[in-house]
Image (cartoon, rainbow, N blue to C red):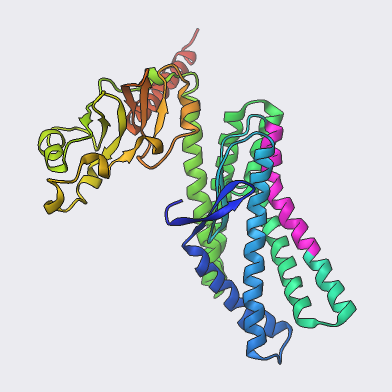
């Protein structure tokens, strides 16, 4: 996710934090220290409220981390590759490959909400027990708040709306029942769009009635609607590309440039004639070394263009997606890197033989749509 940075590892998976997390901690801490705890336990000092609000924020973020860690651990236990876990203002996100079977997809999706519900139950029980055994009202209240918050988080995540975990559960259940993964995914994504729009409507109505929390609900609904729509487009593309080999999709021949050129020579000899916004680079042996994007070239100061090599501002091969001509395109798209956009270098025997760009994918999608429309038209002709 853009705007995030790596802070460590969890269960062997890179852990990242988005810049919005500190903002979320401040908002949670403010609400807990200025509204919730003073309302539950009036008369305490400002120092007590401040300390407990900070502790509550940290404990809630730890709960969110455990929620995402459950997804990652379940996925890895079932041989699903996990790229990273990112904490951000909406909670968390675990990037992983697609589960190979419906039971695995169901287990991965359900593990997060189940973890939140378990944390919620344990925290509530601990808070009640602490208050009964010792009478420590403030720590007990904090644990009760943490418990209810996790229960709410678990229940909310079970809403049948992609990208929430409940939407993934619906997809896995439909897939398990029908045996048709792509159709189940389309149905789940459509459900996510509907629920997202309903949440937006409820949020705006609440806001018009004076409830400021309605704005946050509307924002969540907008996020769900947009994300579900994007995933539906991806599902449509996956269906259209089923059985398509990389060689059938790639553009060839490819405009390339030597990676040892200085930026000014690259501009004069290549960029002015190029029809694409990204150019693959080759070394002295004719092997690909990366891709340079025109927007990166434009950031090089004019005074440095005579000395800076084009490879110095390129995306290196290690951060690009490579594919063989005979690979299935859908399999390659599952592992695509986004550093250079949705571009795939097609390599055969160490030599660049083609490239797959977003334009190539859209061309295949349009062909699939036209073919489907033609087949439906033929099927409707009178016999």
Left or right of 23 in this view: 278: left
Quadrant in the picture for residue 48: bottom right
243 lies above or below 67: above
Left or right of 300 in this view: 228: right
Residue 283, image x, y percentages = 26, 29
Residue 109, image x, y percentages = 66, 43
Residue 75, image x, y percentages = 65, 40
Quadrant in the picture for residue 122: bottom right
**Residue under the point 71% across and 89% down:** 42
Residue lying at the far top in this picture: please name it: 383
Numbered range of the magenta stretch: 102-122
* Viewer can see residue 260: yes
Residue 96, image x, y percentages = 56, 40
**Residue under the point 54% across and 68% down:** 24
Left or right of 46 in this view: 281: left
**Residue under the point 50% across and 32% down:** 334
């Amino acid at each position: 996710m853009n705007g995030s940075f790596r802070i460590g590892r969890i269960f062997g998976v890179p852990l990242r934090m988005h810049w919005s997390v500190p903002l979320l901690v401040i908002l949670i801490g403010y609400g807990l220290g200025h509204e919730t705890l003073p309302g539950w336990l009036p008369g305490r000092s400002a120092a007590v409220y401040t300390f407990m609000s900070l502790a509550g924020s940290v404990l809630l973020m730890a709960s969110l981390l455990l929620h995402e860690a459950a997804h990652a651990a379940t996925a890895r236990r079932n041989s699903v590759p996990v790229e990273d876990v990112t904490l951000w203002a909406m909670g968390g996100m675990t990037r992983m490959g697609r589960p190979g079977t419906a039971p695995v997809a169901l287990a991965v999706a359900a593990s997060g909400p189940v973890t939140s519900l378990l944390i919620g139950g344990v925290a509530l029980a601990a808070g009640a027990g602490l208050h009964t055994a010792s009478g420590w009202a403030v720590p007990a209240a904090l644990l009760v708040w943490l418990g209810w918050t996790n229960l709410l988080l678990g229940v909310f995540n079970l809403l049948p709306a992609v990208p929430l975990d409940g939407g993934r559960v619906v997809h896995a259940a439909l897939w398990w029942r029908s045996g048709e993964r792509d159709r189940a995914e389309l149905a789940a994504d459509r459900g996510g769009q509907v629920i997202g729009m309903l949440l937006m409507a409820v949020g705006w109505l609440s806001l018009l009635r004076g409830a400021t929390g309605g704005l946050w609900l509307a924002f969540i609904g907008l996020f769900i609607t947009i994300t579900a729509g994007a995933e539906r487009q991806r599902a449509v593309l996956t269906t259209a590309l089923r059985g398509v080999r990389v060689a059938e999709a790639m553009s060839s021949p490819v405009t390339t440039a030597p990676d040892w050129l200085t930026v000014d020579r690259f501009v004069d000899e290549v960029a002015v004639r190029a029809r694409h916004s990204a150019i693959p680079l080759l070394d002295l042996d004719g092997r690909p070394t990366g891709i340079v994007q025109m927007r990166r070239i434009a950031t090089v100061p004019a005074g440095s263009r005579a000395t800076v090599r084009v490879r110095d501002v390129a995306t290196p091969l290690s951060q690009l997606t490579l594919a063989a001509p005979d690979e299935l395109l859908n399999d390659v798209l599952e592992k695509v890197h986004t550093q250079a956009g949705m571009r795939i270098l097609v390599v055969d025997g160490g030599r660049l033989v083609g490239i797959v760009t977003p334009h190539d994918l859209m061309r295949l999608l349009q062909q699939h749509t036209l073919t489907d429309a033609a087949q439906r038209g033929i099927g409707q002709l009178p016999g």
